[in-house]
Amino acid sequence: MKFRYLGTAAAEGFPGMFCVCDACKRARIAGGRNIRGRSQAIIDGKLLIDFPADTCMRVLNGTLDLPAIHDCIITHRHSDHLYAPDLEMRKKGMCKADGEVFRIYASRPASDIIKETMDIYDLYEVVELHAIKPFDVFTVAGEYKVTALPASHDPKVIPDGGRAVFYIIEKDGKRILYAHDTGYFPEETWKFLEENRPYFSLASLDCTGGPLPLRVNHMGLAACKEVTDRLKACGCFDGSTRVIINHFSHNGGLIHDELVPVAAEYGFEVSYDGFELTV
Ligand SMILES: [Zn+2]
Ligand SMILES: [Zn+2]
Ligand SMILES: [Zn+2]
């Protein structure tokens, strides 16, 4: 699988939209990999992960061929991962799409937001919503086996089990763990991982806080190390697993260039917008 980060910041963007902190000032001056948009990634140019408002800018600047994409999995309802009103732009009269629907997979409450948007703009001809639940295993684009795991993020939990999720994505015997947004994983997720022991070639871990000791809702470097150690102990990671930290907030205080040597001490690579690798 060819995995590409499209956006690697937390919700504020990095530099933050309205922010004049020292890290944001340094990021603006340094430019390049130090400038991060909101969370999004794509696999093989066809399986999109998350749909933030920044999706539009990626289409405009040529980094995302959205008309060619028909499948999108959503982690959760926060606006840096889901900006549902832009689905209207696929409506007939607003767009000449290729006739294939845009399939979007999300757990509640994110799927409720998408459904409400589909109701408002009457998108049922062009968007197909698949409401999933934590621990669902489903096939996307006919070739990717996707497993939704409960995240420790967003306190809203729906009585039917709906909540924020993150994903295992599997194809041709290779597995990617895309763990955003989440704090240290919930025990029910650990139970699944420790019972099933899926081996990951690549893991993208929430490291919103960078050097800050975040462990609930989001993680920092120390919690990412804890997760990595536990995944190694159960055989899900080994020395060949590429562990990439991602989803950074300016509140962590380190711009990309400053974070790279700190992360290297933990054995982690640092994401940046446009970072592409093959597993
Ligand atoms: Zn986020
Ligand atoms: Zn800032
Ligand atoms: Zn979030």
Image (cartoon, helix red, strand yellow):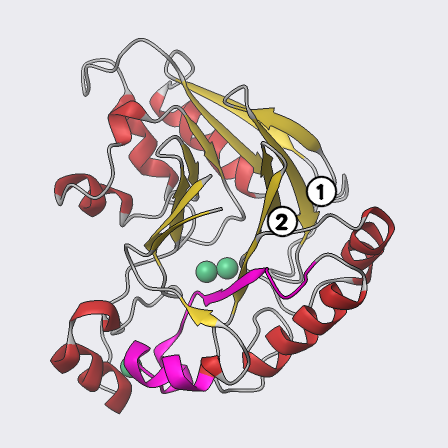
The percent coordinates of residue 240 (x first, y second) are: 59, 61
Check disc 1 and give the amino acid type: Pro
Q: Residue 118 location, x and y as percent?
A: 42, 25
Residue at 56% x, 36% y is 106
The residue that disc 1 covers is 134
Q: Do the residues labelled 1 and 2 touch (CB within 8 Å)?
A: yes
Give the CA distance from mark 1 to mark 2: 6 Å
Residue 82 in which image quadrant: top left
Q: Is 246 one of the magenta-colored residues?
A: yes
Q: Which of 29 and 21 is in front in this view?
A: 29
The secondary structure type at the circle numbered 2 is strand
Instruction: Answer above or below: position of 120 versus 19.
Output: above
The image shows residue 8, relative to residue 69, as above or below, that is below
Whether residue 129 sits left or right of residue 41 in the image: it is right
- The residue that mark 2 highlights is 165
Q: In which quarter of the image is residue 139?
A: top right
The residue drawn where x is 63% and y is 66% is 239
The amino acid type found where label 2 is placed reads Val
Q: Residues within 10 Å of mark 2 (few under 14, many from 20)?
A: many
Residue at 58%, 86% (x, y): give it: 213
Tell me if residue 210 can be seen: no
Can I make out residue 232 in this image? yes
Question: Which residue range is magenta in the image?
Answer: 237-262
